[in-house]
Amino acid sequence: MEAFRWAVELGSDGIELDARRTREGVVVVHHDPFLADGRPIVETALRDLPSHVPTLGAALDACSGAAVNIEIKNSDVEPDFDPDDHVAIEVLAELAERGPDAGPWIISCFRLATVDRCRALAPEVPTAWLVMQLDGAVVTTSADHGHAAVHPWERSVTAAMVERSHDAGLAVNVWTCDDPARAIELDGWHVDGIVTDVPDIILEALGR
């Protein structure tokens, strides 16, 4: 959470974080499915997690002043895979409790069925399909399913695909770019967001 607060202080417009569930089904923020000692988070009780693993609610509080991109982790090759999307349901419940004036938020996931579920349950919350490759099929599917954005790996992005996405009514938020020269190129193509580990360096490169 210190990193989230620091990112806001450095001028970040938004924060990207990852949502997973504990043994009890509590949503917490952690990128990997395992803790450093090898324990799966989904098999660990909330009280037994390290102090640096916050609940989603605490993390959102730490991101005050910035938009938040909540990536729901729900891969079928990880131990916490859930075809019923309980994490998505709990994330939406947390956002609903905070009310329409909180945020702004966007929910993303590599699993299309999960972002489709979020879109169906809470159409007022913007959603994005997270992908490795931005191509015509991704643009068409994302637009047809009513999502607000596509979130592609930055190395797969071209100027033509950014334009095609925008023509389809989709924002393009790329991940993860730590190279100032590449960020300048992406900005010149009018991408809508750049996820980076070094916001101060990228903001300086973009003159912001």
Image (spheres, rainbow, N blue to C red):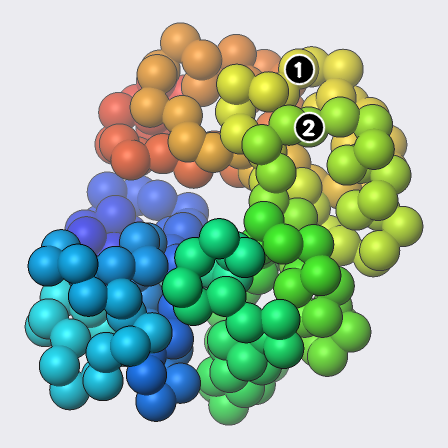
Could you classify mark 2 by the number of other residues whose Cα lies within 10 Å: few (under 14), some (14-19), or many (20 or more)? many
Residue at 34% over, 89% down: 24
Q: Is there any visible trace of residue 105 in the rendered image?
A: yes
Residue 3 horizontal/vertical position (percent): 19, 52
Residue 149 horizontal/vertical position (percent): 69, 46
Q: Are marks 1 and 2 in contact (CB under 8 Å)?
A: yes
In the rendered image, the vertical position of residue 25 relative to residue 80, given as above or below: below
Element class at badge 2:
loop
Disc 1 residue type (three-letter): Thr
In the rendered image, the vertical position of residue 62 relative to residue 148, given as above or below: below
Give 21 or 151, whichever is nearer the viewer. Answer: 21
Residue position for label 1: 158
In the rendered image, the vertical position of residue 182 relative to residue 102, given as above or below: above
Which quarter of the image is occupied by the N terminus? bottom left
Give 55 or 74, whichever is nearer the viewer. Answer: 74
Residue 116 horizontal/vertical position (percent): 74, 63
Residue at 36% over, 34% down: 196
Q: Is residue 124 left or right of residue 15?
A: right
Q: Is residue 90 left or right of residue 117?
A: left
Residue 98 horizontal/vertical position (percent): 48, 85
Element class at badge 1:
loop
Could you classify mark 1 by the number of other residues whose Cα lies within 10 Å: few (under 14), some (14-19), or many (20 or more)? some
Give 56 or 24, whichever is nearer the viewer. Answer: 24
How many angstroms separate mark 1 from mark 2 (CA)? 8 Å
Mark 1 vs 2, N-terminal side: 2
Residue 42 sits in which quadrant? bottom left
Of badges 1 and 2, the one in the foreground is 2
Residue at 32% over, 54% down: 31
Residue position for label 2: 134
Residue at 70% over, 54% down: 112
Residue 29 sits in which quadrant? bottom left
Q: Is there any visible trace of residue 207 in the rendered image?
A: no
